[in-house]
Image (cartoon, rainbow, N blue to C red):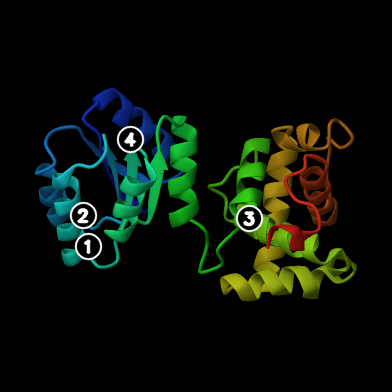
């Protein structure tokens, strides 16, 4: 079942735009723009994985609401999108239990990607945002399971390029251990996203026209690593430790 998110924004149009984008990423979304007091009512009606709250800044009522939510729903994540994002305010939200603070203005797609990265990576294998953001910007669909397996494979191969000499054990196997799945599932999922990337010409853009047709997993991982390096996102993985 899709994870459910409650979005609250006093501006219905912004809340609706965020909700539609989260829907497209595979989430079930409930959007509200009336008073904050409606949020506990919604939370009592069904199970939510997260709440995304838009606020103008140091609002005592938001802190009170956060306290009540976290007291009653221990597993829920709270994301704060704040327009007055000075360091003191952000620190207060994080200390109050926010999983992430998003300083506005930020494009809707960026807001939703932050939420996605926090909620929807498979299993417990957290992914470096430098890699997931780059591949998502390149056009790889985040809602496929293979997206995060690809991110993890790229991460491993940037750190140790010679892993590609034994891709089954040292890439698929390691990624599988990280996410609690078999190497076969990792291989198949990356192959699926490689096929999709060719159909949508994502590979063409990623490799600047050098590859455009059918591509192997090995070629995809190499192309992603090369593109990351050439765009100065990463170089020698230890440089960003």
Left or right of 5 in this view: 214:
right
Q: Is residue 231 above or below residue 96?
A: above
Residue that label 2 marks: 66
| Label 2 – label 1 distance at C-alpha | 6 Å
Circles 2 and 3, Cβ within 8 Å, touching? The answer is: no
For disc 1, the neighbor class at 10 Å (few under 14, some 14 to 19, many from 20) is: some
Sequence order check, earlier mark of 3 and 4 = 4
Sequence order check, earlier mark of 4 and 1 = 1
| Label 2 – label 3 distance at C-alpha | 34 Å
Residue 121 lies, in percent from the top left, at 52, 58
Sequence order check, earlier mark of 2 and 3 = 2
| Label 3 – label 4 distance at C-alpha | 37 Å
Sequence order check, earlier mark of 3 and 1 = 1
Please indicate, yes or no, whether residue 164 appears anywhere in the rendered image: yes
Res. 154 image quadrant: bottom right
For disc 3, the neighbor class at 10 Å (few under 14, some 14 to 19, many from 20) is: many
Q: Secondary structure at mark 1?
A: helix
Residue 43 lies, in percent from the top left, at 17, 53
For the residues carrying marks 4 and 1, which lies nearer the camera in this image? 4
Q: Secondary structure at mark 4?
A: loop
Q: Which mark is residue 146?
A: 3
For the residues carrying marks 2 and 3, which lies nearer the camera in this image? 2
Q: Secondary structure at mark 3?
A: helix
| Label 4 – label 1 distance at C-alpha | 23 Å
Q: Which mark is residue 84?
A: 4
Q: In which quadrant will I find the C terminus?
A: bottom right
Q: Which mark is residue 70?
A: 1
Q: Please tell me which residue is depicted at 86% across the width and 65% down the height of the picture.
A: 164
Q: Nearer the viewer, residue 91 or 187?
A: 91
Q: Please tell me which residue is depicted at 68% across the width and 37% down the height of the picture.
A: 138
């Amino acid at each position: 079942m899709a994870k459910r998110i409650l979005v609250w924004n006093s501006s219905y149009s912004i809340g609706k735009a965020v909700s539609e984008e989260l829907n497209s990423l595979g989430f079930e979304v409930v959007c509200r723009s009336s008073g904050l007091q409606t949020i506990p009512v919604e939370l009592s009606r069904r199970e939510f994985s997260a709440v995304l709250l838009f606020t103008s800044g140091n609002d005592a009522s938001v802190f009170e609401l956060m306290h009540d939510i976290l007291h009653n729903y221990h597993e829920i994540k709270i994301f704060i999108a704040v327009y007055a994002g000075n360091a003191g305010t952000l620190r207060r939200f994080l200390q109050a239990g926010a999983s992430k603070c998003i300083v506005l203005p930020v494009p809707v797609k960026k807001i939703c990607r932050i939420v996605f990265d926090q909620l929807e990576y498979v299993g417990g294998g957290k992914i470096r945002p430098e890699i997931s953001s780059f591949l998502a910007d390149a056009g790889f669909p985040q809602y496929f399971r293979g997206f995060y397996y690809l991110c993890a494979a790229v991460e491993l191969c940037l750190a140790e390029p010679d892993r590609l000499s034994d891709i089954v054990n040292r890439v698929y196997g390691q990624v599988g251990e990280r996410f609690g799945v078999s190497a076969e599932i990792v291989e198949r999922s990356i192959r699926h996203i490689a096929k999709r990337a060719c159909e949508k010409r994502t590979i063409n853009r990623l490799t600047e026209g050098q590859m455009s047709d059918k591509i192997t997993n090995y070629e995809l991982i190499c192309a992603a690593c090369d593109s990351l390096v050439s765009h100065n996102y990463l170089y020698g993985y230890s440089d960003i430790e």
